[in-house]
Amino acid sequence: MAVETSEPRVPRVLDPVALRADFPILRQAVHGRPLTYLDSAATSQKPQVVIDAVADYYRDYNANVHRGIYQIAEQATAAYEAARAQVARFINAPHSREVVFARNATEAINLVAYSWGRRNIGRGDQIILTEMEHHANLVPWQLLVQEVDGDLEFIPITDEGILRLDVFEVLLRLRPKLVAFTHVSNTLGTINPVREMVEMAHAVGALVLVDGAQAVPHSPVDVQALGADFYAFSGHKMLGPMGSGALWARTELLEAMPPFLSGGEMIREVHLRRSEFNDVPWKFEAGTPAVGDAIGLGVATEYLLDVGMDAVRAHERELVAYALDVLPREVPGIELYGPLDPDVRAGVVSFNLPDVHPHDVAQVLDRHGIAVRAGHHCTMPLHERLDLSATVRASFSVYSTTADIDVLVAGLKDVQRVFAG
Ligand code: PLP
């Protein structure tokens, strides 16, 4: 009997130095120094293939979609729908019709809050969020519960920035209708145990929305394996164009939900006093969509899949481990926030220097060509919880290198020199 042998699977390794050649913006100098871009959590840079895809659309087949009965309109429609299929493949959605294009994660979450939320959350109903949410996954729920007289509860964090699942378990006794939380914290880098939390929430009958804005660009995401009901993310943080993003939700949920925005494109039949709506996902895409941006997002997913999302995660894990090791050793007094274990941490490092305001840190770093974010990173309640007014945040992507972190360390030493005495 023949024995089947298979080649051992060799994990792909990402070479950030080689990949940098794909990102034209990284070739420039800022204040006479090479640009060291450490603000990828705010928005990532775009590879040439994405820039080309958007330019090709506008140059060669710019036309509105789903309506034109002529060649370039059909080409635009085919490319737009192909992008939807690419996004579905990227997150392992079972059907591309479960992917609704949105401008960004904020719009995707608002879609759920307005459409599903206004129909399913009523007086006295509970929604559970966490203390580490970005404002995008907080304010839409505040507005909803204020309107319908519902309630919000929050899963607290430990001082290290880990969700207290023991408290979550107790909160679930309130029988919430929805649990909404971020997959990865944009400030602490914490990777939350989505699968486990989904199982806990489903056990009491709650639906789950996951804010994937900081997860999808940095690690493999399989919405079927995670088991959540809604998954929202932005395209511009995952090498795609600004103005691109998506909501994934199960077909039966989308079909039961009323429209969010209304007008053209999302209808099948319109009469003066009533209308019939289009099928999902188009029911949720009112008006002319951002066609070129969606096409660019599709190309970004292909680019990331070519690199390999396991390799992206391994690369960023290595970077964060390096940063967590070198920063406290080389920069006296630096205070780091978030978990110190790189296994539960994505490529985000927030910190403060003693007696220097984060804005001053960022300004001096800018003179070195280093781009970091300073402020509350749209997580004011989290900063309040940690008793901080602001932090400096360095964040990574596929093109980031340990050399970038070394440049950051040198820049921080200069900040300390400038502000000494
Ligand atoms: N959620 C998280 C965790 C984020 O980090 C961000 C952006 O920083 C958002 C949501 C909102 O993303 P956007 O501004 O693209 O809608």
Image (cartoon, rainbow, N blue to C red):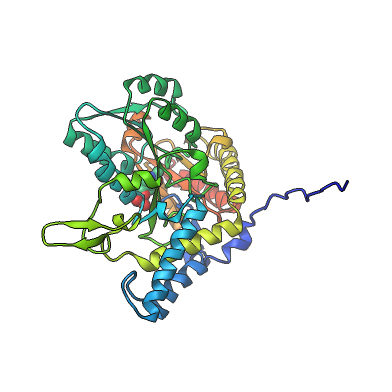
Q: Evaluate whether residue 374 shows in this view.
A: no
- Expressed as whole percent of the image width and height from the top left, the position of residue 318 reads 61, 44
Viewer-closest of 382 and 271: 271
Viewer-closest of 413 and 407: 407
Which quadrant is the C terminus positioned in? top left
Classify 337 as above or below 262: above
- Expressed as whole percent of the image width and height from the top left, the position of residue 183 reads 45, 39
> Tag count in the figure?
0
- Expressed as whole percent of the image width and height from the top left, the position of residue 189 reads 48, 39
- Expressed as whole percent of the image width and height from the top left, the position of residue 231 reads 41, 44
User: Within the image, what quadrant is residue 127 found in?
Assistant: top left
Q: Residue at x 78, y 51 (%)?
A: 7
Viewer-closest of 403 and 126: 126
Q: Residue at x 19, y 58 (%)?
A: 275
Viewer-closest of 389 and 297: 297
Classify 142 as above or below 99: above
Classify 297 as above or below 356: below
Classify 154 as above or below 76: above
User: Within the image, what quadrant is residue 292 found in?
Assistant: bottom left
Q: Give the residue at the far left of this rendering.
A: 273
Q: Evaluate whether residue 392 shows in this view.
A: yes
